[in-house]
Every structure is written in structure tokens, then in C-alpha cells.
Image: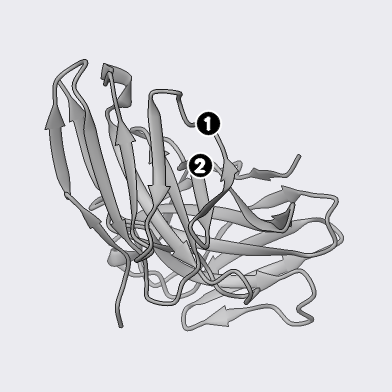
């Protein structure tokens, strides 16, 4: 069974500093996708960044980058130049195809708090 | 751009009542997912539909049912509501044939059972 592990229940970072949120995954499928979502206190789930298992380069989206280490099965999210608005829950998720359909599993999340 | 629309945003029910949550996916998205997120928890997958057919089933209680209609909107029907059903319910949609497309989430329906 596929599994997503986020080992940091909570993280603090100083404003304008960079922070890395950890995510490891476990799957035997050769083809899969990894996603990060942000969930502010208001509750909505916001897509941040995607990394495919066959992608050669690490994904980047503005201040977000994904440190993808396939051999270690890790997909850490790096947020550069943290802003107060980055304070939120962050979920790592993995998608794979099962029986012809997409199946997605979420990690338990990391709560990030940005300190002024 | 159009997003996933969920209604209602908030719903208050009493034990043993029924509730219906609605979801309108992004146009041309062929897959709809329902998730339940309890306080302080990650989203738990309930059920999904691909092209109006149920494609996968997760931890959905027998008291719940869902369907997707011809216009692709989906409804989650919940009966004999219990206090433990209080949660944020998300609907998400995606385009299955494109690998790098994420699930796009609606803003959720916050269900409170009194």
C-alpha cells in the first residue's frame, strides 16, 4: 500500500528565512505524482507544486521548490523567503494509478508558523 | 478561471438527521473525489467518480452514499448523522489523463452535528 510520511507536526521559521518541510513516501509503482497543498486556517486546500516520478528536474513554482530525491523516496518542500501569509498546514500527497483510476493519499500534514 | 464549487459552505444538523452536500467540478474535469477532514486531521478519502461511474471507494460509512449526475455535478448524501460526522467535507476534481494535473479542491462544506 502506498504511504506518505510527514514527520514534522509543527515548524517555526523566521520571516524572510527559508524552510524545508519533509515528506517521504512509499510505493512500489514506477509511475506516480507528488503534490504539496497548503491549507490556511480558513480551511481551503490550495495546490502549490507537483513533481512527477519521471521528471528529471526538481519542480519550482515561485518561492516553492520541491527537493525530489527518488532513491530516498523523499519529496521535501522548500519555501524561500518566508512570509507571514505562509503560516498554514502543509500536506504532502501522492497520486498513482490503481485499476485504471487515480488514487491519492495524503500525509498528516505539517503546521508551519512564520514568526515576524 | 472556474474552480470547484461546493454548497452549502456551512451546514448545521442534529443527530439522526440527513444531509446532502453538492459539488460542481471544474468544467471538462472527468474525475470527482470526496474527502472528509476531521479537526486537526488530514483529508480522508471517501469516494470518487470517473465519468459518472464510481471509480474508487475509501473509508465511506454505509450511512453515506454519493453519485455523479449527467451534468457531472456530484452529491454526497449522509443519513442517520452522528456527532462524529462533524467535519470539513471537500470535493475535488481532476483531469485523469494528464499526469501533472493536481486535484483542485473546493472550499469545503463545514458540517456541524449538534
| Quadrant of the frame with the N terminus of chain A | top right
- Residue pictured at 43% horizontal, 75% vertical: A81
Secondary element under disc 2, as helix, strand or loop, is strand
What residue is drawn where x is 59% and y is 69%? B96
**Mark 2 residue crowding within 10 angstroms, few (<14) / some (14–19) / many (20+):** many
- Where does the image place residue B16, in percent across and percent down from the top left? 21, 16
Q: In the image, is residue A59 above or below residue A5? A: below
Tell me the quarter of the image containing the C terminus of chain A. Answer: bottom left
| Residue B23: % across, % down | 30, 56
B104 left or right of A100 in image: left
Residues marked 2 and 1 touching at CB (< 8 Å): yes
Instruction: Measure the C-alpha gap from mark 2 to mark 1.
Output: 6 Å
Return the x and y of residue A65 as percentages of the image width and height: 58, 75
Q: Which residue is mark 2?
A: B45
Horizontal side of residue B101 vs A40, given as left or right: right
Query: In this rendering, is residue A90 above or below B60?
Result: below
* Chain at tag 2: B
Q: Is A1 on the left or on the right of A46, as rendered? A: right
Say which of A91 and A65 sits in front.
A91
Label ID, residue B59? 1
Residue plotted at (45% across, 23% down): B62
Task: Give the quarter of the image for residue B37.
Answer: top left
Instruction: Measuring from the top left, give residue A66's x and y in whole percent.
Output: 62, 70
Q: Chain of mark 1?
A: B
Asked whether residue B109 appears in the rendered view, the answer is yes
Q: Is residue A54 left or right of residue A36?
A: right
Report if residue B108 is visible in the image.
Answer: no
User: Mark 2 or mark 1, which has the lower sequence index?
Assistant: 2
| Helix, strand or loop status at disc 1 | loop
**Are labels 2 and 1 on one chain?**
yes
Amino acid at each position: 500500500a502506498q504511504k506518505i510520511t510527514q514527520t514534522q507536526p509543527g515548524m517555526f521559521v523566521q520571516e524572510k528565512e527559508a524552510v524545508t518541510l519533509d515528506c517521504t513516501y512509499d510505493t512500489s509503482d514506477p509511475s506516480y505524482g507528488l503534490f504539496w497543498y497548503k491549507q490556511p486556517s480558513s480551511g481551503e486546500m490550495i495546490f502549490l507544486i507537483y513533481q512527477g516520478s519521471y521528471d528529471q528536474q526538481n519542480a519550482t513554482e515561485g518561492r516553492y521548490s520541491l527537493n525530489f530525491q527518488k532513491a530516498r523516496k523523499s519529496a521535501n518542500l522548500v519555501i524561500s523567503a518566508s512570509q507571514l501569509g505562509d503560516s498554514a498546514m502543509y500536506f504532502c500527497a501522492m497520486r498513482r494509478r490503481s485499476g485504471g483510476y487515480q488514487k491519492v493519499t495524503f500525509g498528516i500534514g505539517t503546521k508551519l508558523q512564520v514568526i515576524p | 478561471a472556474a474552480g470547484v464549487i461546493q454548497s452549502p459552505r456551512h451546514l448545521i444538523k442534529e443527530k439522526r438527521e440527513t444531509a446532502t452536500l453538492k459539488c460542481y467540478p471544474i468544467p471538462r474535469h472527468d474525475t470527482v473525489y470526496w474527502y472528509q477532514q476531521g479537526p486537526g486531521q488530514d483529508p480522508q478519502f471517501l469516494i470518487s467518480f470517473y465519468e459518472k461511474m464510481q471509480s474508487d471507494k475509501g473509508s465511506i460509512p454505509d450511512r453515506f452514499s454519493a453519485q455523479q449526475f449527467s451534468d457531472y455535478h456530484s452529491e454526497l448524501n449522509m443519513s442517520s448523522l452522528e456527532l462524529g460526522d462533524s467535519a470539513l467535507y471537500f470535493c475535488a476534481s481532476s483531469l485523469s489523463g494528464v499526469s501533472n494535473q493536481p486535484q483542485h479542491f473546493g472550499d469545503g462544506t463545514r458540517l456541524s452535528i449538534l
